Image: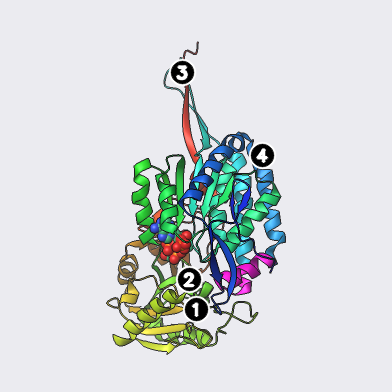
Amino acid sequence: MFDPVTDAFIGGHWMSGPTRFAVTNPANGVVIAEVANLGPVQTVEAIDAAEKALPAWSALTAKARSAILMRWNALILENTEALAELMTAEQGKPLHEARGEVAYGAAFIEWFAEEAKRSYGHTIPTTASSKRMMSIKQPVGICAAITPWNFPIAMITRKVGPALAAGCTVVVKPSEETPLCALALARLAEIAGVPAGVLNIVTGTDAAAIGQVLCDDPRVRKLSFTGSTEVGKILYRQCAGTVKKLSLELGGNAPFIVFDDADLDAAVAGALASKYRNAGQTCVCANRMLVQSGIYDAFAERLAQEVGAFAVGSGSDPDTVIGPLINDEAVNKVEGLVNGALEMGAKALTGGARHDAGAQFFTPTVLIDVTPQMEIFSQEIFGPVAPLFRFETEAEAIALANGTPYGLASYFYSQNVNRCWRVGEALEFGMVGINEGLFSTEVAPFGGWKESGLGREGASEGLSEYLETKYLCFGGVQ
Ligand code: NAP
């Protein structure tokens, strides 16, 4: 691991801040760094810096901005091992997953560096012979990004990549649980030649106060947030005063449906990949396993066999499959949901309790005989627990799957092509994995329906979130 950068980054300067806060390793509670603790005053300074940098950055050609972003992408990839070790130390995920996130995160910078050169407007067939009409795309302006701890690099690059490519400047507020990856990214951006003030990182523990400044300041024209639906709703309200553009990537409650006609091996493999990655702490993790009666027992047995064999431990151990949860609160929540289900008649085929690897570990779990009346049906678990619900008909499965205010990810397994079309179209979710447990990529639109959010990240849609459309009408043409 390279020495972590621990000062905040504003206007091209590294700032030690009025106080410091501790960042701990969730695997063992050891303090790994003391980071600059900024507040509202420094947040205004960061917006000032972003304002100062905006005219020159937005005036560069897309090709010039793209070249700088490509250098940043290359530097991130060159430092994969060091970044992955840093991520595992502050976030807890196994090293092989951390390496994967570095590559995935860098891919957004590369993708948007390429896309920026293709942000076309339109020429519009005129409605009057004396007029000529066209639309052009221009950067939104100063953007704010508030990001969570579960993907400390990718959740930042999915926002900063398109913002910078479009010609915007950015103020990022990373989670206080994982500020070190954000600061390391900023250091590499500085080396890559991103000019002072174009990217600013405000680290701090008073998220509400920092968020309030970012929402209230009329100079900030867009807020992009990834995190819980609860906080997303607060920010949505706070942004009303200045009518900011908003991207909200919020919580999920993903159904994972296994029909009787599924390929059992593929369904089990997909369930393992979707449910247990990052110890179950992803917004697209399968949250409710809906399994048809005819395949229920076989699926449950196979899944439990695989899950029971998972190695649990520190993410830095190369054999580890399941690392720690992010904090005590997370472990308490998972334990409460599992106990609630067990008390109401569910059974643990494997796991079902905390793990003795340490205070923040939970044993990978498979629960059977779970019913929609149990709290675990409606709550985002965010832990390594798969609850298996039984259903009889396709209509019942669709009703159960859609019976949630969330609409982020969904999955189903079936070998019947007609069913694949029917169910794929009936699910009220922004993303559907059909016989596939992993679908996230920079080239496809990521985002949710209903209370899972607004807007899309990745793909060409991801760039348009940072662009305004301007209509130009030339009159008096003879
Ligand atoms: P969170 O508690 O909502 O926090 C997310 C970010 O918001 C953090 O930086 C946090 O800062 C900050 N924050 C907290 N309260 C705030 C406030 N009042 N005003 C402004 N900012 C505030 O969520 P989390 O626990 O970190 O992340 C887990 C959640 O994120 C899950 O619900 C998950 O589904 C969702 N998620 C969604 C996606 C997606 O793409 N849809 C991706 C990943 C995660 P501090 O951490 O410093 O308190």
Amino acid type at mark 1: Val
Q: Which residue is mark 3?
A: 131
- 382 lies left or right of 197: left
Q: Which region of the structure is painted magenta?
A: 82-98
Indicate yes or no: mark 2 CB to ligand 1 under 8 Å. yes
The residue that appears at 48% across and 56% down in the rendered structure is 446
Q: Which residue is mark 2?
A: 281
Query: Residue farthest to the right?
Result: 78
Of mark 1 and mark 3, the one earlier in the sequence is 3
Q: Nearer the viewer, mark 2 or mark 3?
A: 2
Of mark 2 and mark 1, the one earlier in the sequence is 1
Residue 452 visible to the viewer: no
Q: CA distance from mark 3 to mark 4?
A: 31 Å
Of mark 1 and mark 4, the one earlier in the sequence is 4
Residue 82 visible to the viewer: yes
Q: Say which element carries label 2.
A: loop
Q: Which residue is mark 1?
A: 268
Q: Say which element carries label 4.
A: helix
